[in-house]
Amino acid sequence: MDQPTVLVVGGGATGAGIARDLALRGVDVTLVDRDGLGSGTSGRSHGLLHSGARYAEADRVGAEECIVENRILRDVAGECVRDTGGLFVQLADDDPAYFDAKREACESVGIPRTVLDADEARASVPDLADDVVRALEVPDGVMYPSRLVAANAADAREHGATMLLDAPVDGMTVEDGRIEAVRLGGSVDERIGPEYVVNAAGAWAGRIAAMANLEVEMRPTRGVMVSVEYDDLGPVLNRCREPDDGDIVVPHDSEVVLGTTSVAVTDPDDYATEEWEVARTYEECAAMLPPVVDAPEVRTWWGVRPLYAPDEDERGGRGISRGFFRLDHAEDGVENLVSVVGGKLTTYRQMAEATTDLVCERLGVDAECTTADRRLPGADDPDRLDAFVAEFDGQGPTDEDVVHGGF
């Protein structure tokens, strides 16, 4: 039975980031995923690199995390991200007090912001709706999650990590308050005996925890994204109102991604998808950018948010927070398991650092995190990044129009 020091369950951005961070600190780590890398939430997002402005007035800590990680990713991720800038657009029917609160909150948090009048906003985006009142310019951007996840995995492997794909976790053996063995199915089909286990399975984290007789209550919600042909958009567009359906438009090279809805699901693998979600997303996004309503549709997909139920219950509203939670299950009677849940794609690296800090503390490893300063492999070479994506079977629909490594 193979006995890695740490087993990371989940090959999305957070799991790949944890594997990389552990490997860079000299820890023997194996990552497993039931499919290819990024096949869950990470590869089925709208790909927004948050500045923190979306959360500034409701979640100061979350906003601060976003602006810090936004700057780090611009430095280390190269062609995994794109610096587009962003606008929070106030239309005639939107509450001006909400705009003012967001502007003031951004100032308080330290998020760069500039108020544009209607003419200045249209100079930036000529096809903006006629009833735009003003816009708040912030440093939002675009992420290509397929490249991001694959580059993290490649660096982890370069530093000794083992990456096992098509390796679903089928069960765990727990004895005397410790996970003694993990059963892997799929093409791997073996038992392994890690010293420590990290549950980074996102919306599926509750299922993994249940195998260790623990409860991690998730509250997944589905959201639709629609990519349409449109090559005239520079910045990300955000509707400047309380978070609602169809309030984000994310630019790619010759397409834009329209998003999104929020509908509770009970099973992140088996859920209905409704045509009204697509229609509403078109309608609401077109309120900001009218030409998209008639733009040719390229692809439509749904993703599932890995929301942590206790936080959702406490805050009681969509979009109020997307903070992350590090759950040390030693407190629940299983000494060698931690779950990391919630969060955003933008803050994956910070989630990985916090989780790796805990694992290293438990293992007695004295090593500092270096991922905030170390560039990802291939960061300046899109072809190399796309080759990593192909190698790790990693492409999702979010960046299908941009990533072309062997597809």
Image: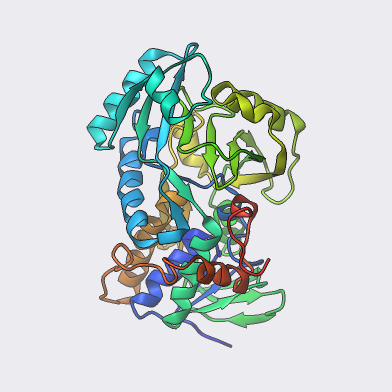
Quadrant assignment for the C terminus: bottom right
Residue for point 34% across, 39% down: 63
Query: Is residue 122 or residue 139 the one in the foreground?
Result: 122
Q: Is residue 369 left or right of residue 244?
A: left
Task: Find residue 300 and report its image quarter.
Answer: top right
**Horizontal and vertical percent position of residue 320:** 44, 32
Q: Is residue 83 left or right of residue 15?
A: left
Give the farthest residue toward the top: 93
Residue for point 37% across, 23% down: 120
Task: Find residue 287 and report its image quarter.
Answer: top right
**Horizontal and vertical percent position of residue 26:** 35, 81
Query: Is residue 176 or residue 66 the one in the foreground?
Result: 66
Q: Is residue 312 above or below residue 215?
A: above
Task: Find residue 10 and report its image quarter.
Answer: bottom right
Residue for point 76% across, 32% down: 275
Protein image colouring: rainbow
Q: Is residue 37 above or below residue 130?
A: below
